[in-house]
Amino acid sequence: MSPPPVALRPTSELPGETKELLERFRAETPRTVEDDWAMDTIQKHLAAGNRPGFLLLGPKDEAIGILLDRVTPIGHRLSVLLAPGFRSPPSARAVLVAAESSAELRPLVGIRILARGPPPSAVAEHFEPRGFRFLGREDLELPDDVPLPVDTPANPRELRPLRATDATALARLMFAAYSTDPYDVAIFLEHQDFGEDCVASVAALLSAKYGPWIPAGSFVREVDGELLGAVLTVQNDGGLIAELLVDPRARRTGLGRALLWAAARGLRGAGHRPVRLVFTKPNRPAEALYLSMGFRPPVPPAAGGDWVNLERVGHPEIAEELRLAPSRDAGTASALLSGEGSP
Ligand SMILES: CC(C)(COP(=O)(O)OP(=O)(O)OC[C@H]1O[C@@H](n2cnc3c(N)ncnc32)[C@H](O)[C@@H]1OP(=O)(O)O)[C@@H](O)C(=O)NCCC(=O)NCCS
């Protein structure tokens, strides 16, 4: 059965309909960190009169969603907000077919159906044959009643506050840290060279891409002029831990945990509650660390993810690793906590 046709119209041509749909999305709770980011971006572009992407029109010319187009040197990365009534696998498939058929969106390297879309398992049969693999993202928060330990495994005095002048060293650390974790790389890759992505990503973080940087919750571990670990926090509906990095040479010494506790203490002390973070799955080391510290999924859980064309982003090897990883519906933090998921 062929999917219902979906037409793409630049949002600048239908600003009223786009705005109205955006307001409906904004009224919905809960949303993921990434939903909020996508909506802010659309809003910003609308206000500036730019073309952020497309309004999706269904078979009866009704607005069924918004597609935010992020153009990168390796291709287009799309974020899709589907309106109520269209959060079904046939609609998701129709959007993918429309996007893949549009010359303006080629090459398409990633598509994110924001959290209220159909579950990944329901659309996999449409996305996987086209070369897209699902990489999940999940929000976690540290409940306010979780006490912060007096002592951390690593001496907190060995940490110092992050400074804007650390940007280059931070990009170097990011490159080293993610060399062991290709999943995050696949989601964020924008340039041909991952080093360039690290530089761009650090610049974006320090210039408020996800919210203003919070120095009180951002720390580094510096040894002989080199950064071995860092945590960076931003203001985003509470205090968001936007990045946690430990150099592979310094792992399993308690540095990741010490950085997180320092960040949580700094954020709470400065009144940024709740302390939140988002992580990409499967990232077992990070997930084990967060859950062991008391981070929990919000109620109800907020999860999303990206369908990434791993061939087009230059990481075909991840497809094989994902094939070996547990099924995409197992292993959510909620399931792990209740003992239902895989360890
Ligand atoms: C995730 C990361 C920050 C952990 O840093 P770390 O300094 O090695 O972590 P710690 O030594 O503080 O580990 C604390 C606990 O986390 C868990 N953990 C850490 N690494 C683990 C691994 N490879 N496998 C399983 N559990 C692991 C363990 O429970 C560990 O406690 P233990 O050593 O007493 O068993 C590090 O692996 C990293 O930088 N990864 C790449 C970047 C990344 O994924 N960042 C998070 C993005 S959301």
Image (cartoon, helix red, strand yellow):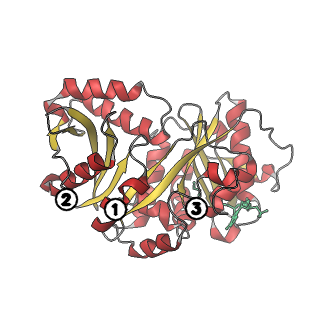
Mark 2–mark 3 distance (CA, rounded to whole Å) = 30 Å
Disc 1 marks a residue whose amino acid type is Glu
Element class at badge 1: helix
Q: Position of residue 154 (x, y in %)?
A: 80, 56
The numbered mark at residue 155 is: none
The one nearer the camera, 199 or 4, is 4
Disc 2 marks a residue whose amino acid type is Arg
- Whether residue 75 is visible to the viewer of this picture, yes or no, is yes
Q: Residue at x 48, y 69 (%)?
A: 322
In the rendered view, does 117 fall on the left or right side of 101? right
The residue at which mark 2 appears reads as 106
Mark 1–mark 2 distance (CA, rounded to whole Å) = 22 Å
**Relative to residue 331, is residue 151 depicted above or below?**
above
Q: Quadrant of the C terminus?
A: bottom right
Determine crowd level at label 3: few under 14, some 14-19, many 20+ residues with C-alpha closer than 10 A: some
Q: Are marks 1 and 2 in contact (CB under 8 Å)?
A: no
Q: Earlier in the sequence, mark 1 or mark 2?
A: 2
Q: Regarding ligand 1, which quadrant of the image does it lie in?
A: bottom right
- Whether residue 73 is visible to the viewer of this picture, yes or no, is no
In the rendered view, does 278 fall on the left or right side of 81? right
Q: Which residue occupies the extreme front position in the image? A: 1
Disc 3 marks a residue whose amino acid type is Asn
The residue at which mark 3 appears reads as 283
The residue carrying mark 3 has its beta carbon less than 8 Å from ligand 1: yes
Q: Residue at x 64, y 30 (%)?
A: 272
Element class at badge 2: loop
The one nearer the camera, 178 or 156, is 178
